[in-house]
Amino acid sequence: MTNFRKTTTLLASLAALTIALPLAANANPILDSYKAQAKTENTAFKDFSAEAGKKLYTTQGPNQLSCASCHSDSPKNVGKHAKTNKAIDPLAPSVNAQRFTDAAKMEKWFKRNCNDALARACTTQEKGDFMAYVLSVK
Amino acid sequence: MTLRTFWRLAATAALAATAFTAHAKYNGENRGKPVMPAQSHAQWAAECGSCHLAFPPGLLPAASWKKVMTGLDKHFDTDASLSPADNQAITDYLVKHASNRWTANTAPIKITDGEWFKTKHRASEIDPAVWKRASVKSPSNCIACHRAADKGEFDDDTVRIPK
């Protein structure tokens, strides 16, 4: 391949990426599977709501705990475990690329943390709303 | 009795006394040696270490770890439940490397309830107010003062109590 062709290919790839990125920014395969699940659970389901997720993030349950108690006011920040002081890496994929990439890990933490914060399991709608909010934080 | 026999007997008695004392040290609730096995364990490090220091297996006896690992859904008022496969793998690791010097028939689930811990951290050595500092928060926060606790290093000489 000549240098010219190499450069053109590179430029074309970059251009394609630039166009694709804004569209793909909030897309997430795990969010998609929650969406599919929500549809089977509720025929009236429309979409997840980042706004509802934001509200859920600071909603305290019977133990006076919310997501924010450990993950801080913003999912972009490093959090701190409310009981042990241990630092918790940021939740937002915009600053921590490892987040929202492992479906089993997410289910594990939704189970634990919904139980701790809300003293119950979260619905699929709530999980999706939460993800939509955290994905929207740039 | 020749003098030599006397000394031999005396030495044996002294040895027996030492062995007895060692046995009863901390009422039999002694941490293991080593406290941290040379071989690490990926699931143990990741799962136990996501909310707190992954406590070295040698800090508790095997019976304690079995209790801890069967109650993870209510782990000190927190849901720390694991998949059955992860739970089994981590339990095996903890039990295998549990304290090898714990002779008492006790199994506390709090490391801080062990006699060795209480003796080492008694009020005459550590001012009880230290535990309440924001930088320490609780006696279970080993790494606040034992800065290399994650490597199983708990030497008295390296303790640095934060303000």
Image (cartoon, coloured by chain):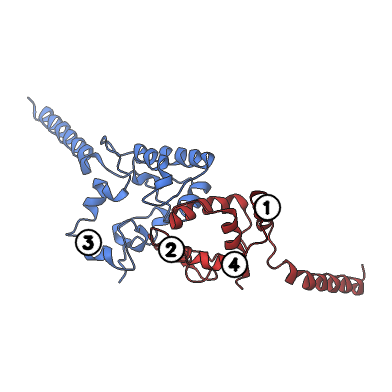
- Give the class, few, some or many, for how many residues have Cα within 10 Å of label 1's Cα (few <14, many ≥20): few
The residue indicated by pointer 4 is A133
Of the two numbered discs 1 and 2 in the rendering, the one whose residue sits closer to the viewer: 1
SS of the residue at dot 2? Answer: loop
Q: Chain of mark 3?
A: B
Disc 2 from disc 4: Cα separation: 17 Å
The numbered mark, 2 or 4, whose residue comes first in the sequence reads 2
Chain B color in figure = blue
Q: Chain of mark 4?
A: A
Residue ranking furthest to the left: B1
- Give the class, few, some or many, for how many residues have Cα within 10 Å of label 3's Cα (few <14, many ≥20): few
Q: Which one of the lettered chains is coloured red?
A: A
Disc 4 from disc 3: Cα separation: 45 Å
SS of the residue at dot 3? Answer: loop
Residue B126: image tag: 3
Disc 1 from disc 3: Cα separation: 62 Å
Q: Is residue A102 left or right of residue A88?
A: right
Q: Position of residue A28 (x, y in %)?
A: 68, 60
The residue indicated by pointer 2 is A60
Cβ–Cβ under 8 Å for marks 1 and 2: no
- Give the class, few, some or many, for how many residues have Cα within 10 Å of label 2's Cα (few <14, many ≥20): some
Amino acid type, callout 2: Gln
